[in-house]
Image (cartoon, grey):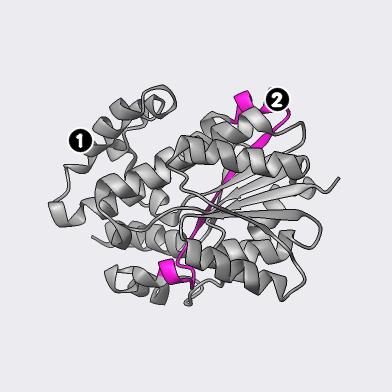
Amino acid sequence: MSRISVITGGAGGMGVATARVVGRDHTVVLCDVRKDRLDGAVAALEDLGITPTAVHGDVTDRQAVADLFDTASSLGPIASVIHTAGVSPSMGDAEHVMRTNAIGTVNVNEAFYRTAGDGAAIVNVASMAAHMLPDEIIPTGQFPRALDDEDAFMTDMSAACEMAPEEARSGLAYALSKAFVRWYSSAQAERFNGRGLRIVSVSPGSIDTEMGRLEEQAGAGAMVADAAVPRWGRPEEMAELLAFCASERAGYLTGTDILNDGGVVASMRERARVAAQDG
């Protein structure tokens, strides 16, 4: 039987680029909430000789995620999940951003945990934004609630976002939700290992996708210009990293986050250090 790779956010720039890589030796299952974009992604991949199975679904809907994994499992053993589904600050209010990015991650990962067999891996997409928050404003103590009390978790995260002016709350929710993805991918590593599963997160910088460009006017453009590698990342560059992390070649990699941001965070930290020293 074919080995199966599930890609959420499969109609997005990173999702399609990753499908091109993993589709060389896996049967690909693409999931996305946008039906029209999903159909377009399938057509583009078929032109390359890759025939994905498309599943229209929302990662915030637990039953839809269960149905996705049922579909994938019916095709063969699940070898990997690459969870790229998410929304940026420009795509909704703080509640929508947090629910999609954090609760969506829990839904997909927990379904993977229940379904996948020994040796499988899941790779979650976080963000460089998660590396930019001061530790003292990240409500890590409340993060575990997402696993057993979704409503309480969302209430706690809403309260955490209220420290920002209303117009900035979706941006803070984005950074906090991606900090959650990093936390989850580390905190659950031992539990996942007990079932022979790996879990990793990858934090992209500004990537030249439709979603990435939505944030260009919100400050991402300036960060790219000042980065150690002063350009936007290419979806193909992220895809190769995501595919590697999900592959057997990365069999010792789990419980950690890989920052792939063109040096933005490194540059910002060093400039802050120099400024503090000179000041």
* Residue at point 42%, 68% (across, down): 212
Residue 8: give x, y in percent of width and height. 56, 52
Whole-percent x, y for residue 158 in the image: 23, 38
Instruction: Assess whether residue 198 is covered by the magenta stretch.
Output: yes
- Which residue corresponds to the image point at 40% horizontal and 29% vertical from the top-left? 146
Q: Quadrant of the N terminus?
A: top right
Whether pointer 1 and pointer 2 mark residues with C-beta atoms closer than 8 Å, the reply is no
Q: Amino acid at mark 2?
A: Arg
Q: Decide: is 99 above or below 8.
A: above
Residue 206: within the magenta? yes
Q: Residue at x 48, y 77 (%)?
A: 231
Q: Which residues are magenta?
A: 189-212
Which amino acid does the dot numbered 1 rest on?
A: Ala
Residue 49 placement (x, y as % from top left): 77, 71
Q: Residue at x 79, y 49 (%)?
A: 249
Q: Which mark is residue 195?
A: 2
Depth check, front residue: 17 or 273: 17
**Residue 55 at x, y percent in the picture:** 58, 52
Q: Is residue 262 visible?
A: no
Mark 1 Cα shell of 10 Å, populated few (<14), some (14-19), many (≥20) = few
Q: Residue under circle 1?
A: 159
1 or 2: tag closer to the N-terminus: 1
In depth, the one of 257 and 83 nearer the eye is 83
Question: Outermost residue, left direction?
Answer: 165
